[in-house]
Amino acid sequence: MIRIAAVGDVHMDRDVLGRFRPALEELPDRADVLLLAGDLTRHGTEEEARCVATEFGNLGVPVAAVLGNHDHHRDEVPQVIRALETAGIVVLEGTNLVLDCGGVRLGVAGAKGFGGGFAGRCASEFGEPEMKAFIRTTQAIADQLGEALREMDCDVRVALTHYAPVPDTLAGEPLEIYPFLGSYLLGQAIDSAPTELALHGHAHAGSERGSTPGGVRVRNVAHPVIKQAYSVFHLYPPYAGTGARVSAAGETGSS
Ligand SMILES: [Fe+2]
Ligand SMILES: [Fe+2]
């Protein structure tokens, strides 16, 4: 069994420091890895990123993250990434990471994602250059995510994004802003590989559970949604040699 802790949208700043740390100190007993689903900072400043590093660094378990739109706001992404990496946090953007969890290879592919909307109610690559650039951006990110998922040599695959890959986990958000909260192209990328679990954030007023058209479980781990320091997902690798998969997932939390 692999235990994956996850949270997004922690929006760190100096006044948030220490809020998560007491629960995080217990993490090595409860999880094998911590995944951060973007919007780690409030406005994307280097100083806020150092707060993330202080709060989520040196936990005793590997930590991987994607950035969110807030982490881009000040156009200091290289500085933000450097601050996170200094604390040992691996930042994924169209890239992946394979971890050995007690002999089971956990593959995590991550990308921030972007908007565009969902089938039947989505923007398309048509018309003005600005609209085409919008959708081409999402398509390029989704293509990188799909490739990063498919290329991994691992036993269990997890997708990590900030933007939502399905509309299910947006329930509670105004319908009018769905196109700014995610894209079905991310869901297609996730379905292009045998993915076990897809985690995202961004939708603070959304809901926790959903699934892709291909049946991959999707969980919105935005902190305002899970209302705890992190959720823990239990994943079971396939039986060796049979191809069968124990697909039960436990979901617990820590406040
Ligand atoms: Fe957020
Ligand atoms: Fe966001």
Image (spheres, rainbow, N blue to C red):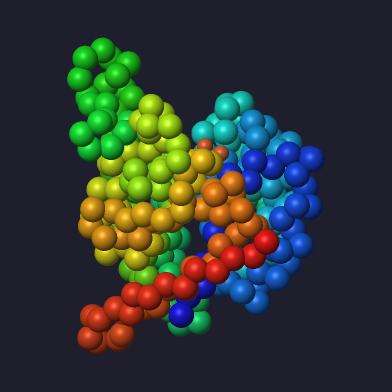
- Give the image location of residue 150, x and y in percent: 28, 58
Could you tell whether 156 is left or right of 38 in the image?
left
Residue sitting nearer the eye, 252 or 195: 252
Could you tell whether 144 is left or right of 241 in the image?
right
- Give the image location of residue 108, x and y in percent: 43, 60
Residue at the spot 30% in from the left edge and 19% down from the top edge = 131
Identify whether 25 is placed above or below 75.
below
Could you tell whether 241 is left or right of 64 in the image?
left
Ligand 1 falls in quadrant: top right
Could you tell whether 71 is left or right of 164 in the image?
right
- Which image quarter: residue 193? bottom left
What number of labels is visible?
0
- Give the image location of residue 79, x and y in percent: 64, 36
Residue sitting nearer the eye, 1 or 118: 118
- Give the image location of residue 132, x and y in percent: 27, 21
Identify whether 201 is placed above or below 243.
above
Residue at the spot 32% in from the left edge and 56% down from the top edge = 211
- Which image quarter: residue 167? top left
Identify whether 47 is placed above or below 104.
above
